[in-house]
Image (spheres, grey):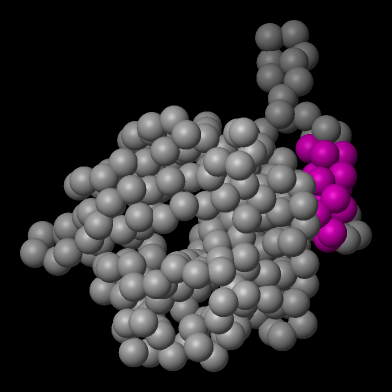
């Protein structure tokens, strides 16, 4: 059955940058409505692997399957069209714009007055408020500026935006960096909510404690090689940390 098959399969992915072997024969799968923790120290190859999946650059070798169909993305736009949305560590929110303008940034709805197309501000505010509430965020007004939001609220806005535009796979790149303990817990709840709403999630981090509460499975990379893959029930957080530190199982 379709729901029993993985949403994403990356098979024997390889990538070199000059003389540097960034990835070597890396294979991963992401199940439907699953949170996969992609772990490893800096330079492990996590970001390279995800940038290949998101269409930032092509692999040198290997295959990618999405919904069991072979895919080759030549740009992030093509990946987004298939339902792959990435929330980067450096959030793509503009401080001096309102929440609703950020929510629809680059995909603004318009309405026509004669031959003139104008922003449909009423629809933007209504949809922004509805979707953000659905993901569990409460803001006083969609007209508030993003600059007044906390880091956790900004992450939640980005997650809500991705879900609104049909994310089947949500890639979170170090989403907990620079967040307080309280904000980290709140973002974890938003991630759980996104999974409940039907998204599969790849959670990239070097901090096991950030992802452990919400992950179903883990893949560990070290210097471009996959050194471990297991269900959360098979290993405690401290054991995962030890594998990352040793660079091998």
Residue 137 placement (x, y as % from top left): 83, 60
Q: Residue furthest right?
A: 140
In the image, what residue occupies the spot 55% across and 41% down? 5
Q: Is residue 132 magenta?
A: yes
Q: Which span of residues is magenta-colored? A: 124-137
Q: Quadrant of the C terminus?
A: bottom left
Residue 248: image quadrant is bottom left
Viewer-proximal residue, 40 or 95? 40
Please indicate, yes or no, whether residue 49 appears anywhere in the rendered image. Answer: yes
Instruction: From the viewer's perspective, tell me whether residue 172 is left or right of residue 40.
Output: right
Viewer-proximal residue, 149 or 232? 232
Please indicate, yes or no, whether residue 102 appears anywhere in the rendered image. Answer: no
Residue 86 placement (x, y as % from top left): 53, 52
Q: Quadrant of the N terminus?
A: top right
Residue 214: image quadrant is bottom right
Residue 19 placement (x, y as % from top left): 8, 64
Q: Is residue 6 magenta?
A: no
Residue 62: image quadrant is top left
């Amino acid at each position: 059955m379709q729901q029993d098959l993985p949403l994403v399969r990356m098979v024997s992915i390889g990538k070199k940058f000059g003389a540097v072997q960034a990835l070597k024969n890396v294979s991963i799968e992401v199940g439907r409505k699953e949170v996969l923790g992609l772990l490893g120290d800096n330079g492990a190859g996590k970001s390279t692997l995800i940038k290949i999946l998101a269409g930032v650059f092509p692999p040198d070798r290997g295959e990618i399957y999405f919904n069991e169909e072979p895919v080759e993305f030549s740009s992030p736009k093509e990946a987004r069209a298939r339902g792959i949305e990435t929330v980067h560590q450096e959030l793509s929110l503009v401080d001096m714009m309102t929440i609703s303008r950020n929510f629809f940034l680059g995909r603004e709805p318009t309405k026509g007055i004669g031959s003139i197309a104008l922003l449909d501000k009423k629809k933007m505010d209504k949809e922004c408020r509805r979707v953000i509430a659905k993901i569990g965020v409460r803001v006083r007004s969609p007209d508030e500026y993003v600059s007044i939001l906390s880091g956790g609220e900004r992450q939640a806005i980005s997650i809500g935006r991705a879900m609104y535009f049909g994310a089947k796979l949500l890639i979170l790149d170090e989403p907990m960096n620079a967040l307080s303990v309280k904000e980290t817990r709140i973002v974890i709840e938003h991630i759980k909510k996104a999974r409940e709403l039907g998204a599969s999630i790849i959670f990239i981090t070097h901090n096991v404690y950030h992802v452990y509460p919400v992950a179903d499975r883990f893949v560990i990379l070290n210097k471009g090689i996959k050194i471990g893959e297991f269900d959360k029930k098979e290993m405690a957080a401290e054991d995962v940390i030890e594998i990352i530190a040793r660079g091998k199982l």
